Image: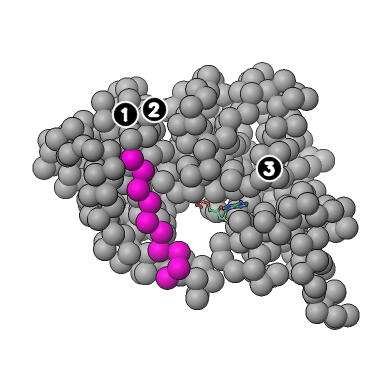
C-alpha cells in the first residue's frame, strides 16, 4: 500500500510517499526558515502563506521522485496537530480534497508521536513495546509505546522543551535561529567541564524534565562574563559544550531509568534534537553499558517531514483507525492516555 503523507504543522511543507509503512519512496521538504530568520522565530502568517504556495509543487515533486501518479495512492495521512492553526488548515484542507477526489481513506496523525515513527524508517526495525524519547522544538516526552495507538506518557517537560532551550541559548550567544545545529557544531571537541551547568532534575525520581533553569544559568553566566570583556569565540564554544552536555546527560539518564523501570530493551528517539551529535554519542555509550538497543532516525528524518506522517498513518490504518472528512486540527499536544 502506498500512503501519501502531508506535513504542515510549522515552517516545513512536506509531502511523502511511503510504501507499506516502511519504505520511503519520496520525502520532499520545503522549509520557509529563511523567511522567518529576520524575526528570530517562526511567524505564523508567513508560515501558512508559504504552505499555500509550496504544497502543490511539493506534491508534484514527490510523485515525480517516486515515479508514481495519484492513482497509486491508497491512503492519505495528514498531520492534524499540534502546530500553528493556519498552517495545519492548509495541510488538512489539501488532505481532505485529495481523499474526496481520489475516494481514498483519510487518517489524521499526531505530529509529536509521528516523530517517533521516524525510527521505524531507519532500516532497523524497533520491537514493540519500546520506550520513546521525543525531543523536538516544542516537546520533550518519555513515552511507553505499547503499540502505535497505545502509548503512555511517563515524563514531560515542565517548562521549555529541549529544542527550545537550544534555541534560546543560541539566541543568548548570538548564534541565530534555529539554534540547535549551531550549538551542536560549536560544541564539537570542546571541554564540557569549563562551564559545568547544573543537571536539572537529575536527582529527582520523577521522569519529568525542566530546562528553563539551565537556560537562565547560561544567561547570567554570559552577563557576568560580558561585564569583564566581550565573549571570545572560544568562550562561546565552551558555554555551548557545557550546556549541551548537561541537557544530553539528563535526557539519556532519565530515558535509561524509564526503560529499566518498565523493563523495556528498545529505545527509540525522535524530533529535531535527535540530530544532535553528542546526544547520539551518549546514547551509544548507554547502549553498550546498559544493554539497550537505541534506534535513531536517519538524519534527514529528524526534522519535520511527511514520511513519518505517512508511516504512522499506515500503522494506525492497519490498527483499524479511520477518520471522516470532518477531521479538525488542534494546536496543542492532547494525546490521551489509553487504558492499560
Ligand atoms: O522536531 P523539529 O524539527 O520541530 C518541532 O516539531 O518542534 O525540532 C526543531 C528543533 C529546534 O529547536 C532545533 O534547534 C532543534 O530541533 N535541533 C537541534 C539540532 N538540530 C535541530 N538541537 C540540537 N542539536 C541539533 N543538531
Ligand atoms: Zn516536529
- Mark 3 residue CB less than 8 A from any atom of ligand 1: yes
Question: Disc number at residue 327?
Answer: none
Q: Marks 2 and 3: in contact by CB < 8 Å?
A: no
User: For the point 42% across and 70% down, which residue is it?
Assistant: 35
Q: Is residue 136 left or right of residue 191?
A: left
Residue under pointer 3? 279
Queried whether the magenta region covers residue 34, the answer comes back as yes
User: For the point 34% across and 58% down, which residue is it?
Assistant: 87
Secondary structure found at label 3: helix
User: For the point 48% across and 27% down, which residue is it?
Assistant: 123
Secondary structure found at label 2: loop
Q: What percent of the width, then of the height, locates residue 148?
A: 44, 27
Question: Disc number at residue 22?
Answer: 2
Sequence-earlier tag: 3 or 1: 1
- Mark 2 residue CB less than 8 A from any atom of ligand 2: no
The residue stretch that appears in magenta: 26-35
Q: Is residue 331 left or right of residue 211?
A: left
Amino acid at each position: 500500500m502506498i500512503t501519501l503523507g502531508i506535513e504542515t504543522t510549522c515552517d516545513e511543507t512536506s509531502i511523502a510517499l511511503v510504501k507499506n509503512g516502511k519504505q520511503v519512496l519520496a520525502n520532499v521538504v520545503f522549509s520557509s526558515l529563511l523567511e522567518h530568520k529576520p524575526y528570530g522565530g517562526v511567524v505564523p502568517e508567513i508560515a501558512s502563506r508559504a504552505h499555500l504556495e509550496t504544497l502543490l509543487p511539493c506534491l508534484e515533486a514527490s510523485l515525480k521522485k517516486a515515479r508514481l501518479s495519484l492513482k497509486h495512492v491508497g491512503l492519505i495521512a495528514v498531520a492534524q496537530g499540534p502546530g500553528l492553526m493556519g498552517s495545519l488548515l492548509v495541510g488538512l484542507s489539501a488532505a481532505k480534497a485529495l481523499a474526496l477526489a481520489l475516494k481514498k481513506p483519510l487518517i489524521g496523525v499526531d505530529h509529536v508521536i509521528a516523530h517517533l515513527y521516524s525510527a521505524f524508517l531507519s532500516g532497523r526495525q524497533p520491537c514493540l513495546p519500546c520506550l520513546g524519547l521525543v525531543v523536538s522544538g516544542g516537546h520533550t516526552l518519555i513515552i511507553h509505546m505499547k503499540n502505535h495507538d497505545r502509548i503512555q506518557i511517563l515524563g514531560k517537560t515542565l517548562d521549555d522543551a529541549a529544542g527550545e532551550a537550544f534555541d534560546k541559548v543560541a539566541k543568548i550567544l548570538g548564534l541565530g535561529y534555529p539554534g540547535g545545529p549551531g550549538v551542536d557544531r560549536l560544541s564539537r571537541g570542546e571541554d564540557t567541564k569549563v562551564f559545568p551547568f547544573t543537571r536539572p532534575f537529575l536527582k529527582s525520581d520523577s521522569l519529568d524534565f525542566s530546562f528553563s533553569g539551565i537556560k537562565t544559568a547560561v544567561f547570567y553566566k554570559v552577563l557576568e562574563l560580558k561585564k569583564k570583556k566581550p565573549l571570545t569565540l572560544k568562550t562561546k564554544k565552551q558555554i555551548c559544550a557545557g550546556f549541551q552536555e548537561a541537557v544530553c546527560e539528563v535526557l539519556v539518564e532519565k530515558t535509561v531509568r524509564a526503560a529499566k523501570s518498565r523493563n523495556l530493551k528498545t529505545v527509540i528517539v525522535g524530533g529535531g534534537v535527535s540530530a544532535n551529535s553528542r546526544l547520539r554519542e551518549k546514547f551509544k555509550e548507554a547502549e553498550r553499558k546498559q544493554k539497550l538497543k537505541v534506534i535513531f532516525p536517519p538524519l534527514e528524518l529528524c526534522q519535520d517531514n511527511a514520511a513519518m506522517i505517512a508511516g504512522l498513518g499506515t500503522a494506525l490504518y492497519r490498527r483499524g483507525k479511520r477518520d471522516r472528512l470532518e477531521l479538525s486540527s488542534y494546536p496543542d499536544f492532547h494525546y490521551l492516555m489509553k487504558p492499560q
